[in-house]
Amino acid sequence: MTLSVTKVSAPAKRFLATLLPLVLLSVPLPLVAQPANSVADDLPLEEIQTFAEVFERIKRGYVEEVDDRTLLRNAMRGMLSELDPHSAYLDEEEYQSLRESTQGEFGGIGIEVGTENGQLMVITPIDDTPASRAGLLSRDVIVAIDGTPTDSLSLQEAVNQMRGEPGSQLRISVLRAGEESPREFTLTREVIRSESVKHEVLETGYGYLRISQFQSRTPEQARRSLERMAREQPLEGLILDLRNNPGGVLQAAVGVADLFLDEGLIVYTEGRLSDTEMSFSASQETPAGDVPLVVLINSGSASAAEIVAGALQDQRRGVIMGTESFGKGSVQQIMPLGNGEGLKLTTALYYTPNGRSIQAQGIEPDVEVVRGRLEVAEGQRQIREADLDGHLSGQDAMPRERAEMSQRLREDYQLSEALNLLKALNVVDRRRR
C-alpha cells in the first residue's frame, strides 16, 4: 500500500506520528511480533491519516478553540456510541452514577431511557419516582430537556441533564404515540432510593411479587418476600410482575429465576472473548416450590427482566402474560479505566435455555393481554333468588362472602386477568388429582 502524505500539514504529521505508535501498542502481541511491514498492512492507515487531518482542521479552524483532551474524549465517545445504543464512554461522574444505579440509590427523576431511530425514548419509569407519578409511559419520546432538543444530545448527555440536585426542577417535552403535540412535564428531582422488590397478598392464598429492576440485592429481597407471604398462609398461586422493568445486573436476574427453578439452564451468553461466554443453571433449592406462577411482562420489560421471563417460559415453570417485551438481548460490561473513568461495552448476547436470542425480538407472551382498566357498570346488578322477600333457604346453604374487587384490580386489567388465570389453573389441577 502506497500512501501520499505530501498534502498533510505539519501539525497533522506530528499528530499522525504520535497516533501510530499508540495504535501499534494496542495490537495483540502475536501481531506485534510479526515483521513491521505486515503490521502496517493490517492497519487502516488511510483512515488514520484522515482522522489526523480532521483533528488538525478542527484545532485550527473551528470557531472556538478546543483543547486536545476534549477532542480526543469526543472521538472516544463517538467511537463507542456508533457501535450500538448501549455502549458508551463514561467520564468519572458518569461512571460513578452508573455504579450507584446498580446499587439502588441515585439522584434524578427515576427513569430508564434508550435511543431508537435517533430518538430519546422512555424504556420505563421506575416505580414510586417522580417520573412514574407524573404519568410517563414506556415508549414515550422525549423531544426536549429544559428546552434543549434531545436530537442534539448523546444518550449519556441526556441522562446527565436529567440527573441533578434533589429538589431542583426538570422540564421535559414528551411526544406520545398517536398524539401530534408534545406534552410538557415539570418534575422535581429526588434522591431515588429504589427498593426493587415489593409484595402483597391480593386474595387469600394468592400472592403478588413486584420486581421493578434488578439490583445486586434483588434476589435476597425477593427471597424474603416469598418467605413472608408463605408464613402468612400457604400460597395457591403467585403473580410475578416484571412490567416496566428495565433490567439491571445479570447475576441478579439469574438469582431471581433460581428462586422458581430447581434444575436446568437459566441463561447462557456468547461473545468473542472467552470470559464473555458464561452459563448459569438453577440450584436444587427453590423457596417458591411448585406454586402456580403467572409472569406479567410488557414493552417496558427489558434485558434482565427478559432473561427471567425467557427462562421460566422455556422451562415451562409459569405462564407468561401481557404484551411483547422490549427485546434487549445484549450484555454490557462496565470496564474501569485507570483515570477513574470507564467504558460500558457490549461484549455478548444472551440466550434463553432453548437457545433463543432476545435481541431485537423480545419475549412473546403465552397469553396476550393488553393494558387496560376494568369498568364495572353501576346499577346493573341482577336480582337473584336470595334477594326476594320470603325466599327459602337451602338446607345446606352457607353464608357467602362477597368480597369487593379491590381498586388495584379494577385499575389494572392485566393483573386482574393474571389472578383469574391462577384460579382457573387451580380448579383444573384439583380435578386432575
Image (tube, grey):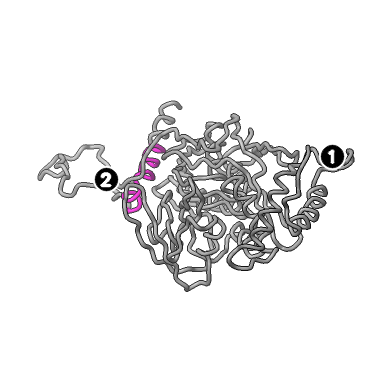
Please, what secondary structure does the residue beneath circle 2 have? loop
Q: Decide if residue 201 is on the left or right side of residue 262.
A: left
Answer with mark 2 or mark 1, whichever residue precedes in sequence: 1
Quadrant in which the C terminus is drawn: top left
| Residue 31, disc | 1
Please, what secondary structure does the residue beneath circle 1 have? helix
Residue 140 in percent (x, y) is at 41, 52
Q: Residue furthest left?
A: 389
Residue 251 in percent (x, y) is at 64, 47
Dot 2, how many residues are within 10 Å of its Cα: few (below 14), some (14-19), or many (20+)? few
Mark 2 in CB contact with mark 1 (< 8 angstroms): no
Is residue 219 shown above or below 193? above
The residue at the point 14 percent across, 44 percent down is 387
Residue 225 within the magenta-colored segment of the rendering: no
Residue 412 within the magenta-colored segment of the rendering: yes
Q: Which range is magenta? A: 407-423
Tell how many labels: 2
Q: Quadrant of residue 395?
A: top left
Query: What amino acid does circle 1 point to?
Result: Leu
Dot 1, how many residues are within 10 Å of its Cα: few (below 14), some (14-19), or many (20+)? few
Q: Residue furthest top?
A: 432
Q: Decide if residue 163 is on the left or right side of residue 254.
A: left
The residue at the point 35 percent across, 58 percent down is 183
Q: Residue furthest bottom?
A: 167
Quick one: 76 or 41, which is closer to the camera?
41
Residue 316 in percent (x, y) is at 53, 31
Quick one: 19 or 178, which is closer to the camera?
19
- Residue wearing tag 2: 399
Quick one: 72 or 208, which is closer to the camera?
72
Residues at marks 2 and 1, CA–CA distance in whole angstroms:
84 Å
Residue 210 in percent (x, y) is at 48, 50
Query: What amino acid does circle 2 point to?
Result: Pro
